[in-house]
Image: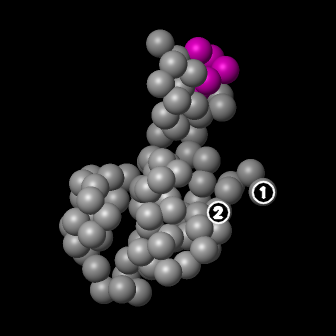
Amino acid sequence: MISSFAMESGTCDVHGWTSAAVPWMKNYVKVYRAMHNLTQAQLAEKLEVSRATINAIEKEHYDPSLKLAFKMARFFEVKIEELFENEET
């Protein structure tokens, strides 16, 4: 069960995942994907994730793991800060 603090902060204190209700980051994944003329399915295959994962990230319903965020930045050959922006700053 998620505590009220965890819901406000957006992080499950049991599992450590980020809540879709409170996204932490704005991202430009869809922009970079379009610049590379890739479909969500094609990008998902290259990154070894599901198309649904790419869709959720692009719609800012899901913040990727740090490992996946770095993998995406390397794939697009950009700094991670160019791909993801902390909404609190």
In the displayed structure, does residue 68 sit left or right of residue 22? left
Q: Position of residue 87 (x, y in %)?
A: 68, 55
- Three-letter amino acid code at disc 1? Thr
Residue at point 59% right, 15% down? 3
In the displayed structure, does residue 64 sit left or right of residue 38? right
| Residue denoted by label 2 | 85
Residue 30 appearing in the image: yes
Quadrant location of residue 50?
bottom left
Q: Position of residue 75 (x, y in %)?
A: 42, 75
- The correct choice, above or below, for 55 with respect to 41 in the image is above
Q: Are marks 2 and 1 in contact (CB under 8 Å)?
A: yes
Crowd tier of the residue under label 2, counting other residues whose Cα lies within 10 Å: few below 14, some 14–19, many 20 or above: some
- The correct choice, above or below, for 43 with respect to 4 in the image is below
Crowd tier of the residue under label 1, counting other residues whose Cα lies within 10 Å: few below 14, some 14–19, many 20 or above: few
**Whole-number angstrom distance, CA of label 2 to CA of label 1:** 8 Å
- Three-letter amino acid code at disc 2? Glu
The tag on residue 75 is none
- Residue stretch in magenta: 3-7
| Residue denoted by label 1 | 89
Q: Secondary structure at mark 1?
A: loop
